[in-house]
Every structure is written in C-alpha cells, then in structure tokens.
Amino acid sequence: MDIFIEPIGKLINEFSKLPGVGKKTAQRYAYKIIDMPEAEARAFADAILGVKRKVKYCKVCGNFTEEETCAICRVREKTTICVVKEPKDVAAIEKLHEFKGVYHVLHGVIDPLSGVGPNDIRIRELLARLQDGGVKEVIVATNPDVSGDATAMYIAKLIKPFDITVTRLAHGIPIGSEIEYTDEVTLARAFVERNQI
Amino acid sequence: MDIFIEPIGKLINEFSKLPGVGKKTAQRYAYKIIDMPEAEARAFADAILGVKRKVKYCKVCGNFTEEETCAICRVREKTTICVVKEPKDVAAIEKLHEFKGVYHVLHGVIDPLSGVGPNDIRIRELLARLQDGGVKEVIVATNPDVSGDATAMYIAKLIKPFDITVTRLAHGIPIGSEIEYTDEVTLARAFVERNQI
C-alpha cells in the first residue's frame, strides 16, 4: 500500500521538481495545498498557467515581458546596455535602483563543455543593437565563473571595433564580510583589482 | 516600475504562501515554472486542482482518501486504534511499517487558548467506534506538547469506562543523540519513564 493516495503522491512529486525541494518539503507544501480553500488553490493553479501563457521575451533585450517589448526597453535611455545571462539577473540588478540603462539578456553563456557556442546565445542580437548606434557603454554582468568570464572576454573582443566602452562588474571582497573568511580566489582577485584611495 | 511583470509577481506571491517560503525562494520556484515546458507546468497546475477535487476524508478514521473509506480502514485489523492529530501523522507512522492497526484522526487537539474544545475535534467519532466493540487498545499518538498531552489525558479519561487499554507513545532521548545535548524537558521525561533492563 502506498503511504500517499494517488492525487497527493502526484502533487508531492510535482513539488519535488522545484529547485532544492526534497520529498519532505514537497510533502509539507502538498499538505498546505490540501488545507487551502478551493478558491485559493485554484488561484495558485491559475498563476502557474498564467506565467506560461502570458510571459514572453522582449524582442529587443530578451527580458520577460507581456508585450512585444519590455517596460525597461520602452522607457529607459539606451546609451548604456547591461549584458546579463538570464532574465533573473535583470530582476536582481533592478532591485538596486542603481542602473538606469537598458539590458541585453543572453539566455545563456558560452560553455563548450555543454555544447553552448557563441551562436547559441543572443550575441548576434547584441551586435545588431550596437550597429544601430547611440550606445556608449556595454557593461558585461555575466557571473564571475569560467563560462561567465569567457563570455565576457568574447563579447569584449567583438565590440572592440565599435567606439564603445566595455566594462565588467568589479570583483572583490563582499561588503560586510571579513578578510579572514573571504575565499582565496576572491581575495586574490581583490588584490589584483585594488584601487588607489 | 515593478521589478516583476504581473504574471510573475502573482506566481511569486502564490509560492510565498507555502510554509517556510520567503520572497527569494518563491522567486526561484517561479523561475523554474517559467522554464518548464508548457505540458509540465500544466501537469503541476492539474496536480494542485487534483488534490482539491479528489482528496476527501475517510468516513471512519478521518484520514485522506479518494473513496468513502480509506485503504487502511478497508483492510487492516481493527483491534488497535492509533489516535493522531492530523492526516500527516498517519503518513509519518505508516512509513515505519511497524503499526498494523487502524487510525483515528482527530483533526486537531484540545487547545482552549485557541478556542478548540473537545467537541471541535473528532473525539465523539472515536467513542462511537469504541462502542461498536472489538477494540482492545487505543494508542494516543498526539504530539508531546501541552495541548497534545491534555488531549491524550482527556481521551484516556473518556475511555476508562470501556475495557480498553489506553497507551501513549514513549518519550525520551532520541536514538543516536547524546545525553549532553538532549534538552532538559526531554531528559527529565526520560528519567521519569526509565525502564528496567
């Protein structure tokens, strides 16, 4: 005899597909759904279907949007483009309310080991945007890992012929952390990128 | 401008309703749904609607079931009844494959501070089952907290007139843990409930 009846087992299985969710957590989530009023559970299911139905990618930058182009592309000044790997990186940067330019989402990074080459991500679309003119700076904000760095270097090289500044986010010791506990790679990078005070 | 477009914000909000899920985790879950193939997201939504539509409570024991009575009530021997607070406790005990009797789910415990009295939980239904005869032992497996203990005592008193043994799960030091790190209440309980070896 199964411990869970079929509809509950099914829901636990679905929740287990979420990142970092094991059987035990999935179970807790499933119990929560069972305890929800009918209307609330329906709203939950509708929200899941809603993102699949309504969320598209911006024709210009590749960010999430419900329209042809995203709200950022529609209103922001376009002299600075921040290049990121995924739409969620846009959300992370937007939270700062610091960056006032537009984005370009690559939808991936160059990673030969996984068979992802320059043509598999939205680099061509980035170059097309630069050819239109008006862009003064491209900030490459890919993750500070091997493939993120490789992608940044590749993009920098491609942009060189244009009269455009290419920058990369600074690496170093996180604010509020301690030198003693900073990992060696980051600490070494902080030395190399040290600034005059 | 909102950081998230409306359908994504809505889904993040829904995921935030799950126990222990904050904005950040809800966001990760929402991104996972966005990345899912359409069919997979639909299966997820269907699973949520499925539990609301199909899961009922067993007429006899109060456990989850798709039928009138649950699979446990249908096939198990009925001389021993294990009384638990919620259906999820049934799942926890069933995992042991140790207990061979049937259950009785109270759907709550007596908790005057929250306005839950004996008539608000399924105690009357338990007594009705006992009156039918054949039951030899009632194991009260409510949680070892104030309301769980109070409920156990209350039920034990009610059952006294019947010729039925009432037992309660043992309290003590968890297997594999160390005496040094066992909390004081548990350790004191372990002294009181010490067994001859």
Image: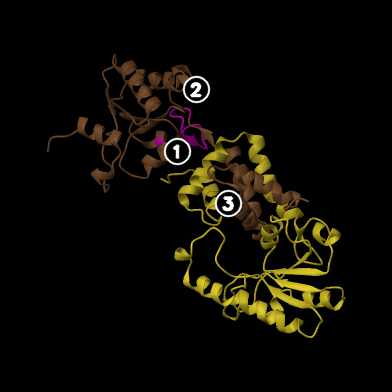
Chain colours: A yellow, B brown
Left-right relation of A22 to B31: left
Picture layout, residue B90 above or below residue B129: below
Residue type at the position of mark 3 = Thr
Q: Is residue B40 left or right of residue B6?
A: left
Residue B92 visible within the image: yes
Q: Counting other residues with Cα less than 10 Å from the Cα at mark 3, is it few (<14), some (14-19), or many (20 or more)?
A: some
In the picture of the structure, the residue carrying the numbered disc 2 is: B114
Judge whether B133 appears above or below A20 on screen.
above
Work out which residue is located at the far top of the displayed protein and give it.
Answer: B161
> Camera-side residue: B155 or B81?
B155
How far apart are labels 1 and 2 at the CA level?
21 Å
Asked if residue B37 can be seen in this view, the reply is no
Please give the name of the residue rendered at 38% of the width and 37% of the height, measured from the top-left corner. Answer: B75
Q: Does the magenta stretch include residue B63?
A: yes
Q: Earlier in the sequence, mark 1 or mark 2?
A: 1
Whole-percent x, y for residue B103 in the image: 38, 32
Name the amino acid, label 2.
Ser
Q: Which residue is drawn at 57% across and 69% down?
A: A172
Query: Which labelled disc corresponds to residue B25?
Result: 3
Q: Mark 2 lies on which chain?
A: B
Position of B84 relative to A185 (above/below): above
Q: Is mark 3 on a helix, strand or loop?
A: helix
Magenta region, residue range: B59-72
Cα distance in 3D space between marks 3 and 1: 24 Å
Secondary structure of the residue carrying tag 1 is helix
Say if A183 sits above or below A92 in the image: below
Circles 1 and 2 on the same subunit: yes
Residue drawn where x is 45% and y is 35% of the image: B87
Along the viewing direction, whichever of A16 and A153 lies nearer the viewer: A153
Callout 1: chain = B
Q: Which mark is residue B88?
A: 1
Residue B98 in the image, given as x and y percentages of width and height:
30, 42
